[in-house]
Image (cartoon, rainbow, N blue to C red):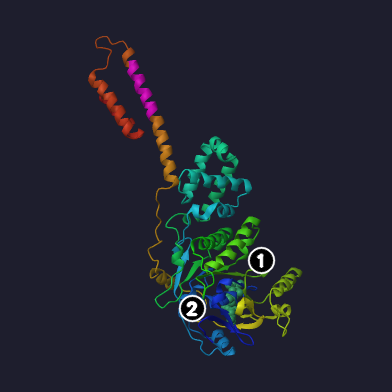
Amino acid sequence: MLVDDKIFLGTSTQPEYLALKYGNRHGLVTGATGTGKTVTLQVMAEGFSAAGVPVFAADIKGDLSGVAKMGAAQGWQTQRATDIGFTDYKDDVFPVIFWDLFGRQGHPIRATISEMGALLLSRMLQLNDTQEGVLNIAFKLADDEGLLLLDLKDLRALLVDIQERSKEISTRYGNVSATSIGAIQRALLVLEQQGAENFFGERALEIADLMRTDRDGRGFISILAADELMRSPRLYATFLLWMLSELFEELPEVGDVDKPKLVFFFDEAHLLFDDAPKVLIDKVEQVVRLVRSKGVGVYFVTQNPVDIPESVLAQLSNRVQHALRAYTPREQKAVRVAAETFRPNPAFSTEEVITQLGIGEALVSVLEAKGIPSMVGRTLIRPPSAQVGPLLAEERRAIIANSPVAGLYDTTVDRESAFEVLAKKARDKQLAEERQRQDDEIKKTERTYQEAPAPRRSTRQTPAEAAMNSLARTVANRLGSALVRGILGSLKRGR
Ligand SMILES: Nc1ncnc2c1ncn2[C@@H]1O[C@H](COP(=O)(O)OP(=O)(O)OP(=O)(O)O)[C@@H](O)[C@H]1O
Ligand SMILES: [Mg+2]
């Protein structure tokens, strides 16, 4: 049943395989809660890994982490293997790298603000069009003035700078109102409260680290801990979308491949599209379409195919549809839509069967020879070979400690960027003003000194005094104003 160039998914009236050479033609795993989606995802991830294809998947409930541990099949797993005559079924374990945006359950994943870009950041911050316009200007300005936008404090510093120079910037780039800047600043605050402070900065994720294979030639399965992240769904969705667009931008064109370069599973994919603006949907559609020729397969996992916009859905060729409920009219419609996406099988009514499927049973249709979708098959999905269900915390820790990226991302690097540059600019400005004031003061003192009636002494400065004052000025020029104040004070006291 296990064959080199395809992944065994399960058995209908025949074994059903996902052909590796069509692995980059994208896919869809759908079904109501508890119908077997995550297990199917694990089966696919194991299959790709075994074939040397690296995988990236978000782990919403922590239940995918078991793929890192040798399975000990019993109960439903061995039962299912027997039911489908899967004679070469055996326990196995797969190489895993754990990632976590918060850096707790895996290596931190970071992006810089510039990499994230204005479109995705606006989505993350829920900005309206006007505010997005201002954010665009901020990015443009940073570009023009050579300011690096790495972390959130860079962006905050830039916004303050823009506010101070709003007149000049408005004439050069277009209107930047204080209201819009204020709104962006508030949205940034909310983002920080969601813990996003950690996501932005360096060292930023390098795509190459998602594309590793182990010594046996197996693809690493990168698992992003997403349980905590899911509490901020928009953040989750935008971050995954950013990763997808990074893959698209970084990877070379490869055309048709024997097997994908990487497979990306997008769980809870509906979050990406919930009230998403048209520009964003267009961008997703475009990235999904183009990333294929870079050898990347994208698999959306969601409850219902209607969660996904038509234009994106049309590109998802390898499909596994678990059971759907059809109690309400809306659900019935969804079932109809789901059924229509399959190439019919004369042996049964797709629409009827969707509601009758058991747990771990699914309608499967994949691309076959010449890239034509196979006739839909009512399929019992095979059991995974690794552990099904979460790892223990200490098992996870051991894997993190021995990971091939251990130590690479675990500490934050903060190099000079917009925040530091603008802070220096502000400091220099303040210094210059301070110096000016000191100079004026000194001049004034000198004048008073000269003008004051001096009964016994000459009204002129003694050479020593003049040297003192000029020394004070020189020192003032060289050192910070705080220091200068101290020095002047002691000079005065000393006199
Ligand atoms: N291929 C299978 N064969 C036999 N039983 C299965 C199979 N797949 C899943 N099951 C059973 O169904 C349970 C739930 O599966 P799974 O966690 O994959 O559902 P899900 O669709 O991801 O649910 P949720 O929407 O809650 O995440 C499994 O723990 C297992 O007991
Ligand atoms: Mg699940």
Residue 399 appears at what percent x and percent y? 41, 71
Dot 2: what SS?
loop
Rendered position, 239 above or below 219? above
Rendered position, 398 above or below 143? below
Q: Residue at x 54, y 76 (%)?
A: 21
Residue 292 visible in the snapshot: yes
Q: How many marks?
A: 2
Dot 1: what SS?
helix
Residue 157 appears at what percent x and percent y? 48, 44
Task: Please name the amino acid that badge 1 sits on.
Answer: Asp
User: Badge 1 is on which residue?
Assistant: 307
Disc sitting over residue 490 in the figure: none
Left or right placement of residue 166 versus residue 399 in this view = right
Left or right placement of residue 345 versus residue 283 in this view = right
User: Badge 2 is on which residue?
Assistant: 51
What residue range appears in magenta? 435-448
**Label 2 CB sits under 8 Å from any ligand 1 atom:** no
